[in-house]
Amino acid sequence: MRKFWGGAKMHTKNPFFLNQGGQVLAEILIAVVMAGVVIGGVASTIGTSLIASEKTKQTNTATALAQQDLEAVRTIGESNWFNIYCPPSGSCPGSKGASVNYQIILSDGSWQMQSGVATTTIDGIIYTHYFNIENVSRNSEGAIVAYSGTSEDPSAQKITAIVSWPNIDTNFTISEYLMRTTSAYFKDFNWQSGNIGAGPYTVSSGTYAATSAPIIIENNAIKVDM
């Protein structure tokens, strides 16, 4: 039986549908919250991945620049070892060590070194790169060790290439030992006793240097008294 008041029709509400509507709303809210958590996690992962990818790209660029400098130093050493042993011009004693920086330049179609550091801009990032040259020693077993002031091996040098760019904590470095592969020599005659110089000599000069053993002159020939 239906009842009417003032021409309005009254409907009786079903509690089942009320409860069902509330449950659906709760499920929607839970789904929204879960979607937010998932999306936030994915966004964070993507952001971290992009940062890591950019850092990897920058490290690869730094590696290429360091390798380029090392290859140029090898080329210079093969052309004239004294340019490496007595940098930068091959005039001994030269200037080198962990605090002495050199850069590579291209002059007249060939690699040359000069004091200072180089800068290269790649993808809008300024990379500073340079290298150091250090003497090395040999231990009792003949292995290369850090220079100790004695037992120097003049046919080996430690080359360290350094690269830096903004937003890195420490410089990127690559070190290698460069070995002398060829030797230059000259003949000299008519040695005279008393003509002692500082050396080393790369051309005939008529003088000599004694460092670890006495020098003996006999019949205008020079020899080391072992």
Image: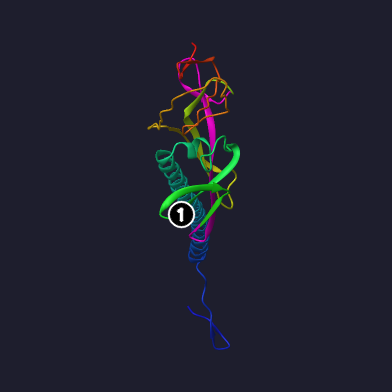
The secondary structure type at the circle numbered 1 is strand
At x 56%, y 49%, the residue is 117
Can you say whether 140 is above or below 83 in the image?
above
Within 10 Å of disc 1 (Cα), the crowding (few <14, some 14-19, many 20+) is: few
Q: Residue furthest left?
A: 182
What's the residue at 48%, 23% (across, down)? 191
Q: Is residue 138 magenta?
A: yes
- Let me know if residue 163 appears in the view: no
Q: Residue furthest top?
A: 226
Q: How is the image coloured?
A: rainbow
Q: Is residue 112 visible?
A: yes
Closer-to-camera residue (73/53): 73
Question: Left or right: where does residue 101 sit relative to residue 81?
Answer: right
Q: Dot 1 corresponds to which residue?
A: 107
Count of number-bearing discs: 1
Query: In percent of the image, x 41 and y 28: which residue is there?
Result: 187
State whether residue 12 is above or below residue 132. Answer: below
Q: Residue 54 location in percent, x, y? A: 48, 53
Q: Residue furthest bottom?
A: 7
Q: Amino acid at mark 1?
A: Ser
Magenta residue span: 121-148
- Taking depth in this image into account, of 225 and 163 the one nearest to the observer is 225
Q: Residue furthest right?
A: 99
Residue 68, percent across and down?
43, 47
Q: Examine the image and state in which quarter residue 219 appears.
A: top left
Q: Is-magenta flag for residue 175?
A: no
Which percent across, then down, holds residue 134? 54, 33
Q: Nearer the viewer, residue 222 or 212?
A: 222
Magenta stretch: dominant SS? strand
